[in-house]
Image (tube, helix red, strand yellow):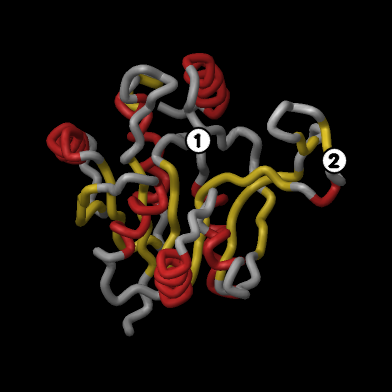
Amino acid sequence: MDSSVQAILIAAGKSERMKKNKLFLKLLDKPVIYYSIKPFELQANIKEIVLVTRPENRKKLESLIQKYNFKKIKKITEGGKTRQDSVYEGLKTLDKVSEVLIHNAANPLVTKKEIADVLKATKKYGAAAIGYPAKDTIKRTNSKNFVTETLARKKLWQMQTPQGMKYDIAVHAFEQAYKDGFTGTDDVSLAERIGYKVKLIEGSRENIKITYPEDLKLAELILKARNET
């Protein structure tokens, strides 16, 4: 197998809480997804990018790729019913891959350095992900919202993307998850459950996910502070 790194960008969500497709909303006169793609396009170690999307967004994405001259997006594929299904659909399109990075297209503020850090750790440990230590107290509750446990904050992390795995580990983890009927809340959790160790890389709290309208306002402030256009 040739050594190459490919990225899967997940752009197949329904944006139900935003009431419109958030990936095409404007941040400083460019769509959200432009900023999600750009650092992967500029990362020298990324050979190709696969976009996983909904069928109705394909033409719009093809137009965007052409407009902004993104060269590394070689494939656009249709997502599945769940995020996990969509990642697996992306995985199935890959060929001759050493490592794969998976990123939410709704996280437009990831940096080239964060991508490089996750990739470096993935190459060394087999699986890695970016996140940051929880700063707030986290409590576990029952179905009626009564507290059942206060968790030890110093051992808790809030996860972000990108998340990386060696290709063989990713395929093994996803196939085993489907055999077992398991659905994870993030990608590396599928590797964790079958015994692979996952290295966490501390990233920036600026790497936010666009979920609500106020997130767009925060993202614009961050981009302006970075002097990005």
Q: Secondary structure at mark 2?
A: strand
For the image, the number of numbered tags is: 2
**Residue located at (20% from left, 37% from top):** 61
Screen quadrant of the N terminus:
bottom left
Could you classify mark 2 by the number of other residues whose Cα lies within 10 Å: few (under 14), some (14-19), or many (20 or more)? few
Please give left or right for residue 13 compared with residue 173 in the image: left
143 vs 74, nearest the viewer: 143
**Residue 79 vertical position relative to residue 127 in the rendered view, above or below:** above
**Residue located at (30% from left, 55% from top):** 49
Q: Residue furthest front?
A: 144
Where residue 48 appears, x then y in whole percent?
Answer: 29, 60
Please give left or right for residue 203 compared with residue 86 in the image: right
Could you classify mark 1 by the number of other residues whose Cα lies within 10 Å: few (under 14), some (14-19), or many (20 or more)? many
Q: Earlier in the sequence, mark 2 or mark 1?
A: 1
Q: Nearer the viewer, mark 2 or mark 1?
A: 2
Screen quadrant of the C terminus:
top left
Where residue 130 appears, x then y in whole percent?
Answer: 60, 51
Q: Amino acid at mark 1?
A: Leu
Quadrant assignment, res 108: top left
Residue identified by numbered label 2 = 149
Q: Amino acid at mark 2?
A: Glu
133 vs 182, nearest the viewer: 182
Please give left or right for residue 197 compared with residue 215 in the image: right
Please give left or right for residue 101 compared with residue 153 in the image: left
**Residue 111 vertical position relative to residue 172 in the rendered view, above or below:** above
Q: Secondary structure at mark 1?
A: loop
**Residue located at (41% from left, 19% from top):** 18
The answer for how far apart the CA atoms under marks 2 and 1 are is 33 Å
Residue identified by numbered label 1 = 109
**Residue located at (35% from left, 19% from top):** 26
Do callouts 2 and 1 mark residues in contact (Cβ within 8 Å)?
Answer: no
